[in-house]
Image (cartoon, helix red, strand yellow):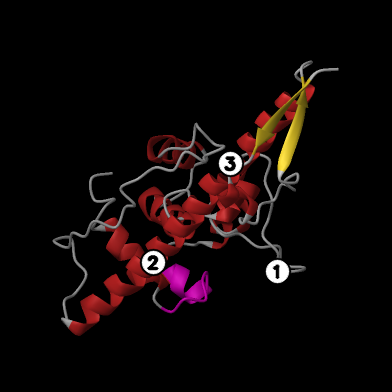
Amino acid sequence: MELETYHLIDSLKQVKNPIDMPGDTIQISTDGSMLQKLRQTASAQVLYYESLIDSLMFENFKLKMDLAVIKRRINDFPISKDYNENLSSGIRGKYNPNDDLTIESLIAEIQKNGIKHPKIVLAQAILETGWFKSRVCHTHNNLFGLRQPWDGEYFRFERWQDSVKAYRTKVQYKYRGGPYLQWLKDLGYAEDPNYTDKLKILLYGPLKTY
Protein backbone atom coordinates (compact mmCIF):
# COMPACT_ATOMS: atom_id res chain seq x y z
CA MET A 1 0.00 0.00 0.00
CA GLU A 2 1.31 3.47 -0.91
CA LEU A 3 2.38 5.45 2.13
CA GLU A 4 2.66 9.16 2.81
CA THR A 5 5.00 10.56 5.49
CA TYR A 6 4.04 13.40 7.82
CA HIS A 7 6.66 15.10 9.99
CA LEU A 8 5.77 16.57 13.39
CA ILE A 9 7.15 19.94 14.35
CA ASP A 10 10.01 19.80 16.86
CA SER A 11 8.18 21.81 19.54
CA LEU A 12 5.50 19.15 19.94
CA LYS A 13 8.12 16.53 20.74
CA GLN A 14 9.32 18.58 23.72
CA VAL A 15 5.94 19.05 25.40
CA LYS A 16 4.57 16.59 27.93
CA ASN A 17 1.04 15.63 26.98
CA PRO A 18 -1.59 13.26 28.29
CA ILE A 19 -1.37 11.64 24.85
CA ASP A 20 1.66 9.55 23.93
CA MET A 21 3.05 11.02 20.75
CA PRO A 22 4.58 8.78 18.05
CA GLY A 23 8.20 9.06 16.97
CA ASP A 24 9.86 11.62 14.72
CA THR A 25 7.64 10.72 11.79
CA ILE A 26 4.18 9.26 11.30
CA GLN A 27 3.37 7.04 8.37
CA ILE A 28 -0.23 7.45 7.31
CA SER A 29 -1.85 4.96 4.97
CA THR A 30 -3.99 6.19 2.13
CA ASP A 31 -7.06 4.52 3.68
CA GLY A 32 -7.16 7.42 6.14
CA SER A 33 -7.12 5.39 9.38
CA MET A 34 -3.83 6.84 10.59
CA LEU A 35 -4.84 10.30 9.47
CA GLN A 36 -7.94 10.01 11.62
CA LYS A 37 -5.79 8.92 14.55
CA LEU A 38 -3.54 11.94 14.05
CA ARG A 39 -6.55 14.25 14.01
CA GLN A 40 -7.84 12.70 17.25
CA THR A 41 -4.42 13.18 18.84
CA ALA A 42 -4.36 16.83 17.75
CA SER A 43 -7.86 17.38 19.15
CA ALA A 44 -6.81 15.85 22.47
CA GLN A 45 -3.79 18.16 22.57
CA VAL A 46 -5.96 21.22 21.94
CA LEU A 47 -8.29 20.18 24.77
CA TYR A 48 -5.30 19.62 27.07
CA TYR A 49 -3.83 23.06 26.44
CA GLU A 50 -7.19 24.80 26.73
CA SER A 51 -7.80 23.11 30.08
CA LEU A 52 -4.30 24.16 31.15
CA ILE A 53 -5.09 27.77 30.24
CA ASP A 54 -8.27 27.65 32.29
CA SER A 55 -6.33 26.24 35.25
CA LEU A 56 -3.83 29.10 35.01
CA MET A 57 -6.67 31.60 34.82
CA PHE A 58 -8.18 30.05 37.97
CA GLU A 59 -4.87 30.42 39.83
CA ASN A 60 -4.64 34.01 38.61
CA PHE A 61 -8.13 34.67 39.93
CA LYS A 62 -7.22 33.30 43.37
CA LEU A 63 -4.17 35.56 43.50
CA LYS A 64 -6.32 38.55 42.56
CA MET A 65 -8.69 37.74 45.39
CA ASP A 66 -5.83 37.51 47.89
CA LEU A 67 -4.40 40.81 46.67
CA ALA A 68 -7.81 42.48 46.88
CA VAL A 69 -8.11 41.50 50.55
CA ILE A 70 -4.58 42.75 51.28
CA LYS A 71 -5.25 46.01 49.45
CA ARG A 72 -8.38 46.65 51.51
CA ARG A 73 -6.49 46.07 54.75
CA ILE A 74 -3.46 48.18 53.83
CA ASN A 75 -5.69 51.10 52.90
CA ASP A 76 -7.99 50.42 55.85
CA PHE A 77 -10.87 50.66 53.42
CA PRO A 78 -14.01 48.80 54.52
CA ILE A 79 -15.72 46.57 51.99
CA SER A 80 -19.04 48.24 51.32
CA LYS A 81 -21.60 48.62 48.59
CA ASP A 82 -19.52 51.46 47.16
CA TYR A 83 -16.65 49.07 46.53
CA ASN A 84 -15.97 48.13 42.93
CA GLU A 85 -13.19 45.93 41.64
CA ASN A 86 -12.92 44.14 38.32
CA LEU A 87 -12.04 40.62 39.39
CA SER A 88 -13.55 38.71 36.51
CA SER A 89 -11.12 36.98 34.18
CA GLY A 90 -12.11 39.07 31.18
CA ILE A 91 -11.66 35.95 29.07
CA ARG A 92 -13.81 32.88 28.73
CA GLY A 93 -11.70 29.84 27.93
CA LYS A 94 -12.84 27.52 25.17
CA TYR A 95 -12.45 24.53 27.45
CA ASN A 96 -15.88 24.48 29.02
CA PRO A 97 -17.68 21.12 28.89
CA ASN A 98 -20.72 22.75 30.50
CA ASP A 99 -21.88 25.06 27.74
CA ASP A 100 -25.12 25.64 29.65
CA LEU A 101 -23.31 26.86 32.78
CA THR A 102 -23.57 30.65 32.95
CA ILE A 103 -24.20 33.19 35.70
CA GLU A 104 -27.82 33.42 34.60
CA SER A 105 -28.42 29.67 34.44
CA LEU A 106 -26.75 29.18 37.83
CA ILE A 107 -28.93 31.85 39.44
CA ALA A 108 -32.02 30.17 37.96
CA GLU A 109 -30.92 26.78 39.31
CA ILE A 110 -30.22 28.21 42.77
CA GLN A 111 -33.69 29.74 42.86
CA LYS A 112 -35.26 26.58 41.47
CA ASN A 113 -33.89 24.62 44.43
CA GLY A 114 -35.30 27.12 46.91
CA ILE A 115 -31.87 28.05 48.26
CA LYS A 116 -31.85 31.02 50.61
CA HIS A 117 -29.54 34.01 50.09
CA PRO A 118 -29.05 33.12 46.41
CA LYS A 119 -26.67 36.00 45.66
CA ILE A 120 -24.25 34.94 48.38
CA VAL A 121 -24.44 31.34 47.18
CA LEU A 122 -23.74 32.56 43.64
CA ALA A 123 -20.66 34.38 44.96
CA GLN A 124 -19.55 31.15 46.62
CA ALA A 125 -19.70 29.32 43.29
CA ILE A 126 -17.69 32.07 41.59
CA LEU A 127 -15.10 32.10 44.36
CA GLU A 128 -14.79 28.30 44.47
CA THR A 129 -14.47 27.85 40.70
CA GLY A 130 -12.88 31.13 39.55
CA TRP A 131 -15.68 31.90 37.09
CA PHE A 132 -16.20 28.20 36.26
CA LYS A 133 -12.56 27.53 35.35
CA SER A 134 -11.31 25.28 38.15
CA ARG A 135 -10.36 21.66 37.61
CA VAL A 136 -12.96 20.48 40.14
CA CYS A 137 -15.64 22.37 38.24
CA HIS A 138 -14.60 20.79 34.94
CA THR A 139 -13.95 17.22 36.05
CA HIS A 140 -16.38 16.86 38.97
CA ASN A 141 -19.19 19.30 38.09
CA ASN A 142 -18.65 20.57 41.63
CA LEU A 143 -19.34 24.29 41.95
CA PHE A 144 -18.99 24.69 45.71
CA GLY A 145 -15.92 22.68 46.67
CA LEU A 146 -18.10 20.12 48.43
CA ARG A 147 -16.08 17.27 49.93
CA GLN A 148 -16.97 13.77 51.02
CA PRO A 149 -16.81 13.59 54.83
CA TRP A 150 -15.50 10.02 54.84
CA ASP A 151 -12.32 10.65 52.84
CA GLY A 152 -12.08 14.39 52.21
CA GLU A 153 -12.21 13.95 48.44
CA TYR A 154 -14.35 16.19 46.28
CA PHE A 155 -17.84 15.01 45.48
CA ARG A 156 -18.19 14.08 41.82
CA PHE A 157 -21.54 14.97 40.24
CA GLU A 158 -22.98 13.86 36.94
CA ARG A 159 -24.21 17.39 36.18
CA TRP A 160 -23.38 20.78 37.64
CA GLN A 161 -27.06 21.16 38.54
CA ASP A 162 -26.64 18.22 40.93
CA SER A 163 -24.02 20.16 42.89
CA VAL A 164 -26.49 23.00 43.40
CA LYS A 165 -29.01 20.57 44.82
CA ALA A 166 -26.28 19.05 47.01
CA TYR A 167 -25.48 22.49 48.42
CA ARG A 168 -29.03 22.67 49.74
CA THR A 169 -29.15 19.11 51.09
CA LYS A 170 -25.59 18.93 52.48
CA VAL A 171 -24.94 22.50 53.62
CA GLN A 172 -27.89 24.85 53.83
CA TYR A 173 -30.24 22.43 55.56
CA LYS A 174 -28.34 23.36 58.74
CA TYR A 175 -29.15 27.07 58.39
CA ARG A 176 -31.69 28.38 60.88
CA GLY A 177 -31.65 32.08 60.04
CA GLY A 178 -29.50 35.11 60.78
CA PRO A 179 -26.70 36.84 58.83
CA TYR A 180 -25.66 34.29 56.23
CA LEU A 181 -22.03 35.35 55.84
CA GLN A 182 -21.50 35.11 59.57
CA TRP A 183 -23.22 31.72 59.55
CA LEU A 184 -20.81 30.47 56.87
CA LYS A 185 -17.90 31.70 58.95
CA ASP A 186 -19.20 30.06 62.13
CA LEU A 187 -19.88 26.88 60.21
CA GLY A 188 -16.27 26.73 59.08
CA TYR A 189 -17.33 26.38 55.46
CA ALA A 190 -13.82 27.16 54.20
CA GLU A 191 -10.34 26.95 55.67
CA ASP A 192 -9.44 30.36 54.24
CA PRO A 193 -9.84 32.91 57.09
CA ASN A 194 -10.57 35.58 54.46
CA TYR A 195 -13.33 33.57 52.79
CA THR A 196 -16.25 35.81 53.73
CA ASP A 197 -14.25 38.98 52.97
CA LYS A 198 -13.66 37.63 49.47
CA LEU A 199 -17.36 36.92 49.09
CA LYS A 200 -18.08 40.55 50.01
CA ILE A 201 -15.56 41.73 47.42
CA LEU A 202 -17.37 39.73 44.76
CA LEU A 203 -20.82 40.78 45.95
CA TYR A 204 -20.00 44.50 45.90
CA GLY A 205 -17.76 44.24 42.86
CA PRO A 206 -18.33 42.12 39.74
CA LEU A 207 -21.59 40.59 41.05
CA LYS A 208 -23.04 43.92 42.13
CA THR A 209 -25.49 44.09 39.21
CA TYR A 210 -26.92 40.59 39.72
Nearest to N terminus: mark 2 or mark 1: 1
Name the foreground residue: 188 vs 116: 188
Residue placed under numbered mark 3 in the picture: 47
Name the foreground residue: 148 vs 127: 127
Residue placed under numbered mark 1 in the picture: 152
Q: CA distance from mark 2 to mark 1?
A: 23 Å
Instruction: Check the image and report above or below for 83 versus 193.
Output: above
Instruction: From the top left corner, tell me how far across and down residue 17 is, in percent.
Output: 66, 52
Q: Is residue 151 left or right of residue 204?
A: right
The reply to whether residue 168 is in sight is no
Q: Is residue 83 left or right of residue 130?
A: left
Q: Is residue 107 left or right of residue 141?
A: left
Nearest to N terminus: mark 3 or mark 1: 3
Nearest to N terminus: mark 3 or mark 2: 3
Tell me where the magenta segment starts and ends, as one range: 183-193
Name the foreground residue: 45 vs 25: 25
Q: Is residue 46 left or right of residue 89?
A: right
Q: CA distance from mark 3 to mark 1?
A: 28 Å
Residue placed under numbered mark 2 in the picture: 181
**In the rendered structure, does residue 188 fall within the stretch colored magenta?**
yes
Q: Residues within 10 Å of mark 3 (few under 14, many from 20)?
A: some
Q: CA distance from mark 3 to mark 2?
A: 37 Å
The reply to whether residue 156 is in sight is yes
Q: Residues within 10 Å of mark 1 (few under 14, many from 20)?
A: few
The three-letter code of the residue at mark 3 reads Leu
